[in-house]
Amino acid sequence: MFHWLEQRPFFFAVMVFLFVAFAGVIEAIPDFAKQARPTVGTKPYSVLELTGRQVYIKDSCNACHSQLVRPFKSETDRYGMYSLSGEYAYDRPFLWGSKRTGPDLMRVGNYRTTDWHENHMRDPKAVVPGSIMPAYEHHFTNIADIETAYAEAYTVKAVFNTPYDQEGMPKLGTWEEAKAAALEEAKAIAADMKDEKVKQAVANGEVPEIVALIAYLNSLK
Amino acid sequence: MQNSAQIEYDYSVAKCFTFATILFGIIGMTIGVVLAFQLAFPELNYLAGEYGTFSRLRPLHTNGVAFGFTLSGVFAGWYYISQRVLKVSLKESPFLMVVAKLHFWVYFITILLAVVTLFMGITTSKEYAELEWPLDILVVVFWVLWGISIFGIIGIRRERTLYISIWYFIATFIAIAMLYLFNNMEVPTALVSGYGSWIHSVSMYSGTNDAIIQWWYGHNAVAFVFTTPIIALIYYFLPKESGQNIYSYKLSILAFWGLLFVYLWAGGHHLIYSTVPDWMQTMGSVMSVVLILPSWGSAINMLLTMKGEWNQLQSNTVIKFMVLASTFYMLTTLEGPIQSIKSVNAIAHFTDWIPGHVHDAVLGWLVFMIMAALFHMVPRMFKRELYSKSLMETQFWLQTVGIVLYFTSMWIAGITQGMMWRAYDEYGSLVYSFIDTVTVLHPYYTIRAVGGLMYLIGFFMFAYNIYKTIRCGRVLDKEPANATPVAA
């Protein structure tokens, strides 16, 4: 059989494909629909939160922070309730991470506040002595890209039926409406912050990355 | 047909990929050492503003080494080995020559663009699949070009039977094509909405599904970029360099098909204690242990190829590289399954033991094997004697010590942190806060950085040795002979 195969590249390649493909077919397909079903109360991200999520991804925060609480007492004591599949239903991509150089952030919105994040991002060591996290000063000056976040929300609504604009769900609306709503949200967050330049930028209708990022982190509950 | 003596092989593309291997090796490994030092000395995060932070550089390092260095080495090996074992010269087909050159340039430009975009923070965040959709398309283009090259050269071959290395190249091509396509399914948001950045996309899968597809891909990118093509290299270069026949043909068959059949399941071990279904976690765990058999099959086949010729280890440093690579392959493929056992995974997951494990594979197995392959190929491609054997010997020991420092420190760091996370006092409260488990790792991070630096210095010695060989090695009128001559 194998002697025959190794002289016939075409059938050899077909055989290789069957050997490698079968696991994926058996593994991935059966539970696909079930895994994507949201738990009760899980909502899609608002445009500002999504903007923050993009900042989180841009700076690869997931390289050091996980977003997956494993079902161990030591983890639930430290981080809160263990993770459920449906809680990630609107996460595209998933951000579980693979390495905890810093703590898990799955439910960080439950125990950290806006001003804590502000101080921490500006100077991690001042808040957590011994921290090896770099400071993210540039989040205070870079302006976040709300438009791309709106594009993403629009896309997941159009392509994947993510329930924006439905009853009890976040409102998306047109770009102008979404931008105005994101600015309102940003103002509420900036009100809890100390940085004058950030407040000023928000008042001028711009959202610094730090504001969006904090909106996202606060939404993790 | 045994007329290989008359065939004049064309190495122009293999040479291009050889240079790329060294270039991307230097970039990827230098960034790796910077990252290692950043963990030990966080001030180093501020070397280049927002572009120099650990988080920004980390995907650059993994992509640089995996897809810059490793793939270049694999492609260099392909354009060298394929002509020889299939008994054709690339020159014989102008079409395949164009495909090969195009393959190189599309590949090279893609990797350069990858470096630029990752520096800018343009990433999808999926590990080893960080590139955004325009680059994904370029990846598909150069992969298809490689496929045309593979089946084209096979199509015009004079040697009827495909040598084992060719099996592994075919497997690499097919598996990565499938995995890459499915994992990178994404929707460009600007195309749908008309707003925002044109380069941004959103994943087709959400949450747990995304994780399943990602690790089905992620672990098997390791399988089919870090394992199968490297086995292809060693199956060719070890017998050639040592003049020994492969120990067992049957074992080769068993190991090859066994590896293909089992490997794709192992991705599940990244998701143990996550929200994926329990049976999937268990299958990932069990199949990872089963995977020891085909992995050790290949490695033992390699080591036994040296049977009766172990004295060559003293005289030939290239053999040393390859034997150490096989040994590290065995170590890694035992370590991985151990980490996949649920109770061990509970401690090891999310800790430094995981990067430790990866680097056993990358530093010990993969980079060593690719360097050995280049040490064998370069004198033959450029018809020059290797510049310095003693430099090669020094490099070998420097890097070996580097690896040992790396993995021992990461084992200790990982297990220490894993145990500290779960430590309870007599009153049932957690003993350590998270930051306690970070500060305790400082000495191990320092040792790891030093080990990595030694390895990097070794790589620079390698690059220098190859450079000097090409520039001013003694010219050879015929190929260097093998230790004991075998046919072909």
Image: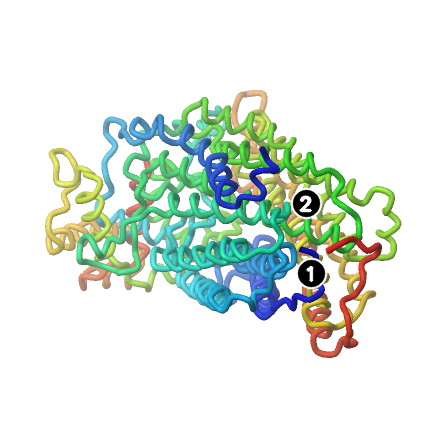
The residue lying at 65 percent from left, 40 percent from top is: B332
Which residue is at the front of the view, A121 or B313? B313
Which residue is at the front of the view, B401 or B52? B401
Find residue B15 and name its label. Answer: none
Amino acid on which the number 2 mark rests in the picture: Phe
Find residue A33 and report its horizontal and vertical position in percent: 29, 29
The residue lying at 30 percent from left, 43 percent from top is: B204
- Chain name for mark 2: B
| Residue pointed to by mark 2 | B407
Q: Secondary structure at mark 1?
A: loop
Q: Is residue B50 visible?
A: no
Q: Residues within 10 Å of mark 2 (few under 14, many from 20)?
A: many
Instruction: Classify B53 as above or below A16.
Output: below
Q: Are marks 1 and 2 on the same chain?
A: yes
Of the numbered discs 1 and 2, the one sitting upstream in the chain is 1
Which residue is at the front of the view, B275 or A146? B275
Q: Quadrant of residue B390?
A: bottom right
Q: Quadrant of the N terminus of chain A?
A: top right
